[in-house]
Amino acid sequence: MRVTDDRYSRDRLRYDLAVRLIRHEARTQTIRQWTGLTDDRIRKLYRSYVRSTEGTRVRRHRGKSPRQASFFNRSRALQEETASLASVLWQFGVLPAQRVPDAARSVPGVARGELLCDAYETHARITPEPQISFEHAVYLAVALAGGVELRALHCRHCRGLGCGDSLALRKATCMSCGETLRPAPLAPAPAPRRAGAQAGTAPLP
């Protein structure tokens, strides 16, 4: 009975996360990657738990997920929002303390997916008219964790967190104080909690 209960619990957490991702208008491939559910199961969850209660307010996007680091540098407003979102992702434990190889495969999971949703929802509440979609937030989290296209950077002056394009020739500057950001070691982020636990915050390094 214990084995059956544990399996039910794990499946329930995956379904709950999938519904949450659907409400954030995540693409099917993103939901599949973070939950492990099949495309057919995701479609059924959408029809049963989202479309039937929320109608057309939740859109289903087609095509590939965003994969362009240049999106976050299109304007100063986007740069400021990206720096803010990166800080929230760090505080909620979405970003690992060190770069991870093959981040697109190793980062997604149910526990970290719940933290990602918590972080994005917090960001949306504290940001006036946010321009970064949930899908772009997913890409930002994975890219920062891998450190290949985007890097998490640290301001030694105001101790803020930002991010920079790994291929850019110009050095990234802090959006708060204007000092040059550096890839200095950051204090360990809080470890992802068991799925279902309440996410907390941690001070920036």
Image (cartoon, helix red, strand yellow):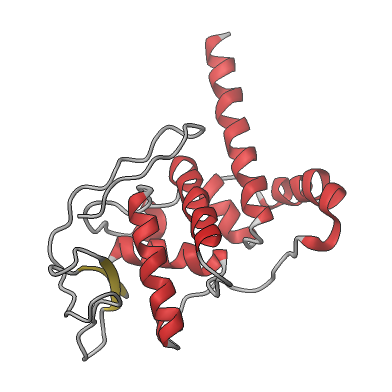
- Where residue 69 appears, as percent x and y from the top left, is 40, 79
Quadrant showing the C terminus: bottom left
Residue 179's place in the image compared with 106, above or below, is below
Q: Does 52 sit left or right of 45 as displayed?
A: right
- Where residue 35 appears, as percent x and y from the top left, is 55, 45
Residue at 65 percent across and 74 percent down: it is 63
- Where residue 5 appears, as percent x and y from the top left, is 58, 16
- The answer to which image quadrant residue 128 occupies is bottom right
Residue at 69 percent across and 69 percent down: it is 61
The residue lying toward the viewer, choosing from 151 and 190, is: 190
Residue 89's place in the image compared with 69, above or below, is above
Residue extending farthest to the bottom is 169
Q: Does 47 sit left or right of 169 as displayed?
A: right
Residue at 24 percent across and 82 percent down: it is 172
The residue lying toward the viewer, choosing from 92 and 62, is: 92
The residue lying toward the viewer, choosing from 181 and 196, is: 181
Residue at 39 percent across and 66 percent down: it is 84
Residue extending farthest to the top is 1
Residue 25's place in the image compared with 54, above or below, is below
Q: Does 161 sit left or right of 22 as displayed?
A: left
Q: Does 152 sit left or right of 2 as displayed?
A: left
Quadrant showing the N terminus: top right
- Where residue 2 appears, as percent x and y from the top left, is 53, 10
Number of callouts in the render?
0
